[in-house]
Amino acid sequence: MIKPALAIVLTSLFIAGCASNTTRDNYQEASFELCNTEVDIYSVSDDGRVRIVCSDGSKFALNSEETLETMRDINIDYCDGEGLGKFSESRRYYSFKCKSGTLLSISK
């Protein structure tokens, strides 16, 4: 009886570990897209916030994967994929600066 129970516990832990790695992998991949350069620091805090510091000094703090997807879309649609230099989010607007220097604010 102990061996099947142990197998179930180990399998559960393995699956849980893989699930969290997928989210982390998505953030890491996106960080390279958003920086469009090397990533110096990538961290995930206990509260789930992701912090990214690019080698050119750009910094981002993400609250959720939803925000990450928005940043990816903005990078492609407004910055032609060259990367973001700054990004902030309010209740009604996204404000951002493309690496080219273009500074924009769009409504949500």
Image (cartoon, rainbow, N blue to C red):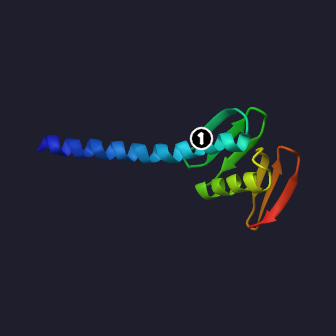
Q: Residue furthest left?
A: 1
Q: Position of residue 80 (x, y in %)?
A: 78, 50
Q: Is residue 35 left or right of residue 16?
A: right
Q: Position of residue 66 (x, y in %)?
A: 61, 58
> What residue is rendered at 68% in x and 34% in y?
39
Q: Is residue 67 above or below residue 44?
A: below
> What residue is rendered at 52% in x and 48% in y?
23
The foreground one among 47 and 4 is: 4
Image quarter in which the N terminus is found: top left
Label 1's element? Answer: helix
Badge 1 is on which residue? 28
The foreground one among 61 and 103 is: 103
The answer to which image quadrant residue 91 occupies is: bottom right
Disc 1 crowd rating (10 Å Cα; few below 14, some 14-19, many 20+) is some
> What residue is rendered at 34% in x and 42% in y?
14
Image quarter in which the C terminus is found: bottom right
> What residue is rendered at 76% in x and 56% in y?
77
Counting labels gives 1
Q: Position of residue 25 (x, y in %)?
A: 54, 42
Q: Amino acid at mark 1?
A: Gln
Q: Position of residue 34 (x, y in %)?
A: 71, 44
